[in-house]
Image: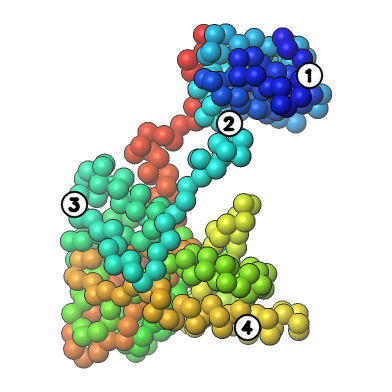
Amino acid sequence: MTVSRTDNQVLAEEVTLFDRSMAVPVHGEVVRCHYVWLRDNCWCSECRVAQTQERRLFTADIPPDIAPTSVAMDGDETLHIRWNDGHTSAYSAAWLQAHDYSDRARQGRRHEPTLWDATFTSIPTFEHDDVVTRDEAQIAYLEAIRQYGVAIVRNTPPVPGEVERFAQVIGHVRETAFERIHNVRHDPTGYSVAHTASELRPHTDMPSYRWPPSIQLLNFLVNEATGGESTVTDGWAVLADLRAEDSAAFDTLCRVAVPFQVFSEEEDTFTTAPLVELDTDGRVRTFRFSNHLVQPLDVGFDEVEPFYTAYRKLGRMIASDRYKVAFKTSNGDLLTVHGHRVLHGRLAFDATSGARHLQDVYMEYDDLMARRRVLLGSHRPKSALEGVR
Ligand SMILES: [Fe+2]
Ligand SMILES: [Zn+2]
């Protein structure tokens, strides 16, 4: 066992022990792991429920001074550790490599979505029968949602309720107030501007929930009216540009809570939230934008002008022709959008010129990505003991 070297003395051939962590040679590279992290991830049958692979070990019971008393690297394949709490653990090199949490490894594993603007005229398009019957086609469709936040599925049977059947193939319907399946057609008594023949500016749906639906499926059963082209806009692309051009405006939109409400005679949904919410790495996670549903701001006096300045800038970008992709859908087209990323809208149509009826349901992005992992066979945690000698 080697003891207490400094960082620049770490060698790729031997395990090096530091005060609270170790450096392990793995297939010619060095992986750094903390003792507490290794102990917490012991995969033995005492620490894991064999049947389910869930953690049995109660993490808070690990002593704060946990450290190895001996360490051995068996060939290049297995790390064996005897701990000062009397326990022994083993970890395969492949597992250590797969869970390397160095900045470089984490960067390499990070998914980078492809942002797009008005020049994105080739929205990924799939055939309905393919997506519902062939795994490879379904994976490609889910991959498109992951990468671009938008996809079109053509030749969906133009039958009421078909959108729900499709949703159940790729995940689960997220129920919200109003209807499980929303009907969007010209209706002078409807509760939403969607039920008029007017233009619908780019927006995200149901910002009035603390967690808005993160997937929306819009199935065009009939689309024979004049006008009414659909639009999609990559909200994350707009925000990336705004952030680069005016970071103060971007920060304002992350900070100021905006009230949103959608209601009808019988139902109500209401929340306050900033338009932009970031993940722990500072990347945009949730974007909500629905100008027609914003209620009077209720914020500190000094926040009002900065908010309107930032909101004006954002709104003008969204309304411009720089980001919006417009296209006419046909009967049987099913449009999928990532509801926390891609804004949808439509141009005005002539309600007397022909029928226009679409049905939409909401879903959750997490469920679609879970479906993708299941189809790829990458959904089970890898055992640290797999391949251990
Ligand atoms: Fe909408
Ligand atoms: Zn164990």
Task: Name the N-terminal-most of marks 3 and 4.
Answer: 3
* Residue position for label 1: 4
* Residue position for label 2: 100
Residue 378 versus residue 49 in the image, above or below? below
| Element on which disc 2 rests | loop
Q: Quadrant of residue 160?
A: bottom left
Task: Name the N-terminal-most of marks 2 and 4.
Answer: 2
**Amino acid type of disc 4?**
Thr
Distance from label 3 to label 1 (Cα)? 61 Å
Residue drawn at (21%, 61%), measured in percent from left and top?
154
* Residue position for label 4: 309
Residue 267 versus residue 34 in the image, above or below? below
**Amino acid type of disc 3?**
Asp
Judged by depth in the image, the label closer to the viewer, 4 or 1, is 1
Please give left or right for residue 247 compared with residue 204 in the image: right
Please give left or right for residue 317 compared with residue 148 in the image: right
Badge 2 crowding class, 10 Å Cα cut-off, few under 14, some 14 to 19, many 20 or more, is: some
Quadrant location, the N terminus: top right
Badge 4 crowding class, 10 Å Cα cut-off, few under 14, some 14 to 19, many 20 or more, is: few
**Amino acid type of disc 2?**
Asp
Distance from label 3 to label 4 (Cα)? 48 Å
Q: Are marks 2 and 4 in contact (CB under 8 Å)?
A: no
Distance from label 2 to label 4 (Cα)? 43 Å
Residue 283, x across and y down, in percent: 57, 57
- Between 282 and 198, the residue placed more toward the observer is 282
**Does the rendering let one see residue 85?**
no
- Between 74 and 82, the residue placed more toward the observer is 74
Residue 27, x across and y down, in percent: 52, 20
